Image (tube, rainbow, N blue to C red):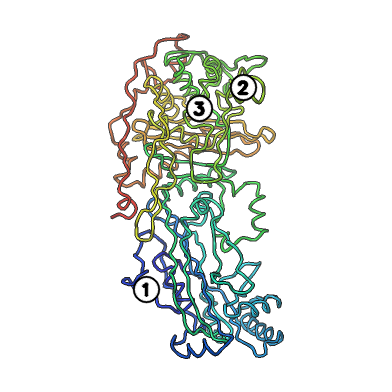
Amino acid sequence: MAFLLTPQNAFAGLVLTLFGLNAPSSGQEGGEKKVSLRAEPVQDLPEASPAAMPKADPKKDLVASWKTQSEARTLTLSIPPPRGQIVDRNGIPFAQNRVVQYLALNLPQFDPPTPERILQFAHSKIASANRILGKNWNLPDDKLLMHYQHRRWLPLVFSIEGGMNVELTLEEQEKIKPLLSDGLFLQASYLRHYPKEGTACHIIGYVGKTRPLPVGPISDGDPIFEEQDGRLGLESSFDADLKGTPGKINILFSPEGKQLSEEMLSRPVPGHNVVTTLDFDFQNYAESALAEHARNGGAMVIMDVATGDVLAMASNPGFNLNDFVPGISATEFEELNTNPRLPLYGRAFQGGYPPASTFKIVSALAALDSGKITAKSYFDCDSSYFIDTRYFHNHSKNGEGPMNVVTAIKRSCNTWFYQVGLLTGADPLTNMAARLGFGEKTGLPLKAESAGFLPTNAYMIQRYGHKIVGGDLANMCIGQGKVLATPIQVCQSMAAVADGKNMAQVRLVKQVQDLNDRVVQAFPVQTRKRIDLKDEIRSPVVKGMIAVVHGSSGTGSEAYVNKSIRIAGKTGTAQWKPDKEQNLAWFTGFLPADNPVYAFAVLYEGRPGENISGGKKAAPIVSEVFTKIYRNAPAEDPLLLAAKAPPKALPVGEEGEDEGGEDSSRKTKTKKAEPAEAPPPPPEENKGPKSFFRRLFGR
């Protein structure tokens, strides 16, 4: 069993364990103020081993030892600092540290130091430990001899399996206590610990050994145990903040290896804590729903519309971060890396997917913004539409008659969007897509984020010698063809549509703070760009999205949460891997539709040959997650407050329509009519950031 290592006991406990130093009191220089981050229960650190470099009276024989004994050594060693924590917005830890104990040799001075005497001593001590613990630990003879020659003053860990140090459990530590005399030693160290295991694994990332411990002659500044650095995710992106500052200790040893004195030159300063925007509950709900309903693969992103905060960014499948502690074998890593389900792949921000019919929101906004159509323009929604040399089909085998933009979004009619897209043209479409954030990274502080792909006329001319025309444009209008997007990009676009005026900068980290609660780096809420969707453009699109969930024959009715919360959404089903007959299902949007608080996007990867749709596979995940969020939300939660507020959205139907329902398909076919007068969109909610300390620590 190991011990969780929190900032308040970090270096003090380690130095005490390693060198028998007294931990600083709260009044001493270097003492640490308790940090109010929520953490798992922490047990007291183990007492130092009786054999742990016995500390003599610094004055006793010190001068004589130093002046008369040529084999005496003074060493200046580096004490690696414990890494800072990574926590959610409420202080729940995703990454911490824990104290562990390894079994080590403490070799005495031999006179004469023959290889036979050194090896006989080492082998006998290791064999005794193995008998007690039932282990088969060993070290190569050349390593033992080299350590004696160059580093015999320092412990040599031999509890090693597969090239990695193996910690002793509390039970094993009790068993080995009788042998902890001359020659055997419990070496304390600390390791990274992920208390939530695989939760947010692709975001948090993991650490690895910075470098092997030196094996040659001791140099000033050599670390007393292995250091770690970030290898993936936030562990890597914020490595410099999380690392802290090493300490230094000066130790004087007698020729026999007995510690005569020590002087703490500088105490290690633990790393800073990284406070993310994630909400552990939201993340957990999303991951649980994906694990249950998207077993082949999937992703879900939830964002705060006003602030751009990423509250959940889940990818399934994932992996247990603790599998990388203290390291992972080449075989185990290869199994993860070659797993066909791609558990190491952060689908939510790394995966470039055809956005399918979720992109129809972009197409509708582009058409309305260009002036080529209005909210009252109707086009026949036939079963197919002939373009260039072939027919492009609708998802329905039967024609559905004339539709306007509201009904076309509600029914997700492909042939309506083919006609409107060709009428609009490529430039207005790609300009609107870029305006909503497609084709560029969202700005997550994660090195692996994908930019997706947005083909433009300029790209097509350079690559293929012609503009986007005909079938390519028709496919793009329904989110197929060359356009690719990540779930976080799709969610970002929905947040922009929900706001209507601004696109908030996506934010994954709120701030970095030191051990004394001081904010050393803040990432304030920012506006990424102005969207400025006019009322007559945004309003009919939002009407159609509401009808997707709440209208008769809407394609996303299974996203329904409750009667208090109306959802504006859009389904999508994409051809993904035709050779394997694998398709994608999407559902994206925002809620409450009348007073938008959260934007979301769900991706479902179908199995080969599986018959899927966004309404049947992705929409129910939204319903499950937000039902949990709604039921467990505190009274002051923005979602509950928005749901209780008077509706500010547009009337659902127009001219007696039932949210663009059955009657709309019987309207007289019209081309360009003047746009209907639209009530104003929801005003921007003033959701300025609450006090960090009140939100994070309940102060």
Q: Are marks 2 and 3 in contact (CB under 8 Å)?
A: no
Q: Earlier in the sequence, mark 2 or mark 1?
A: 1
Q: Earlier in the sequence, mark 2 or mark 3?
A: 3
Residue occupying image coordinates x 41% and y 26%: 542
Tell which of 611 and 672 is nearer to you.
672
User: How far is the residue under mark 3 from the one under mark 1?
Assistant: 58 Å
Q: Residues within 10 Å of mark 2 (few under 14, many from 20)?
A: some
Tell which of 620 and 141 is nearer to you.
141
Residue behind mark 2: 472
Hey, which quadrant is residue 272 in on the image? bottom left
Residue occupying image coordinates x 62% and y 33%: 576
* Secondary structure of residue under mark 2: helix
Q: How many marks overall?
A: 3
Is 524 displayed left or right of 102 in the figure?
left
User: How far is the residue under mark 2 from the one under mark 1?
Assistant: 70 Å
What's the amino acid at mark 2?
Answer: Asp
Q: Residues within 10 Å of mark 3 (few under 14, many from 20)?
A: many
Residue behind mark 3: 433
* Secondary structure of residue under mark 1: loop
